[in-house]
């Protein structure tokens, strides 16, 4: 028994040490997506790196602690400075690096997302905002920022690289399971409509907020699963399911998001999803 307790204790120390080390190291990597476009993966949200002959345009900038590492990785693919940063939304794993860029680059965000930052007392809120659509032109390259509707939040920007037929969706696209931030205007119904709007763009490649690179079929599949999860919730509510049973009863093997206990959808979005769908059924 003593040996068993000792093993459990030592195992706990090992796990804690591993997790602490992983957090401290924050190992990031950069990979080419297309000619002139890279993505930085690792801790926090994915970062898009668009190269031009006059400077670099970043899409998102992770946490404050990632600033130096992002700068180092960008320097591997370009000798030019970061001129612009576009935040896809306000969450700190996508906009936290603003504290390092606010004095050396112009940062752009949707007006609603900036309002969310101000309300949440986040540091380094961007000085530039847009409402419907805007674009940055730098070194002959066009990068569009488009508001296509509610989804993950009420201030998600879809970033479009028209010459590369590529979009970056922030957390409107997620490689594990999505989080519907109802506290900041998120909506599952709006999310489906927003993805449909995104699919009207001419693209074949997508950089999600988390996870690996997607193609157009992956984006369609994401939209379809959101519709299926909503339909599942509606069926359960019609059957008389109480709200406190939703997190368990919504699970289906065919709906991968609902089976991920560690997924953000299961942890945080189900109560709000229940309320949203129930209101639609009234």
Image (cartoon, rainbow, N blue to C red):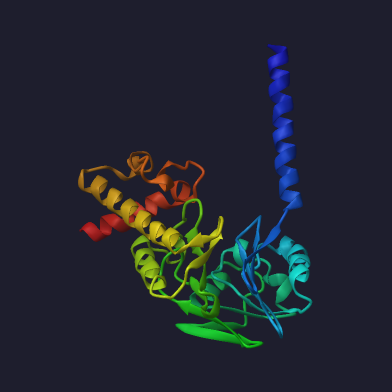
Q: In this view, does 10 lie to the left or right of 219?
A: right
Q: Position of residue 131 (x, y in %)?
A: 47, 82
Q: How far across and down, in percent of the image, does residue 240 sit?
A: 22, 43
Q: Which of 138 and 242 is in front in this view?
A: 138
Residue drawn at the location 26% of the way across and 45% of the way down:
236
Q: Which picture quadrant has residue 16?
A: top right
Picture residue at 53% right of the left edge, 81% below the top: 144
Q: Position of residue 255 (x, y in %)?
A: 37, 46
Q: Nearer the viewer, residue 235 or 219?
A: 219
Q: In this view, does 249 lie to the left or right of 237?
A: right
* Image-quadrant location for residue 143: bottom right
The residue that appears at 74% across and 32% down in the rendered structure is 13
Vertical relation: 92 (above or below) 128: above
| Quadrant of image for the N terminus | top right
- Compared with 257, 45 (above or below) is below
Q: Which quadrant holds residue 34?
A: bottom right
Question: Is residue 60 toward the left or the right of residue 243 in the image?
Answer: right
Choose between 90 and 219: the one closer to the eye.
219
Residue at image point 75% right, 50% down: 24
Q: Which of 30 and 154 is in front in this view?
A: 30
Q: Where does residue 80 sit, x and y in percent of width and height?
A: 76, 79
* 108 to the left or right of 206: right
């Amino acid at each position: 028994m003593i040996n068993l307790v000792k093993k459990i204790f030592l195992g706990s120390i090992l796990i804690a040490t591993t997790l602490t080390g992983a957090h401290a190291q924050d190992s990031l990597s950069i990979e080419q997506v297309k000619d002139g476009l890279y993505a930085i993966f690792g801790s926090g949200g994915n970062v898009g790196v668009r190269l031009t002959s006059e400077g670099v345009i970043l899409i998102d900038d992770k946490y404050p602690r990632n600033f130096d590492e992002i700068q180092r990785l960008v320097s591997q693919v370009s000798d030019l400075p970061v001129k612009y940063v576009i935040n896809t939304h306000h969450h700190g794993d996508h906009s936290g690096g603003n504290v390092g860029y606010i004095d050396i680059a112009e940062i752009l965000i949707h007006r609603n997302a900036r309002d969310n930052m101000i309300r949440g007392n986040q540091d380094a809120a961007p000085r530039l905002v847009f409402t419907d659509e805007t674009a940055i032109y730098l070194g002959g390259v066009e990068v569009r920022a488009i508001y296509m509707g509610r989804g993950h939040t009420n201030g998600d920007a879809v970033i479009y690289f028209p010459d590369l037929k590529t979009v970056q969706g922030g957390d409107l696209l997620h490689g594990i399971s999505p989080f519907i931030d109802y506290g900041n205007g998120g909506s599952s119904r709006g999310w489906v409509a927003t993805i449909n709007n995104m699919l009207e763009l001419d693209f074949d490649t997508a950089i999600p907020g988390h996870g690996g690179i997607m193609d157009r079929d992956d984006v369609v599949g994401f939209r379809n699963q959101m519709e299926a999860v909503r339909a599942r919730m509606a069926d359960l509510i019609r059957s008389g399911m109480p709200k406190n049973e939703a997190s368990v009863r919504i699970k289906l093997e065919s709906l991968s998001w609902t089976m991920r206990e560690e997924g953000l959808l299961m942890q945080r979005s189900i109560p709000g999803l229940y309320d949203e769908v129930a209101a639609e059924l009234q």
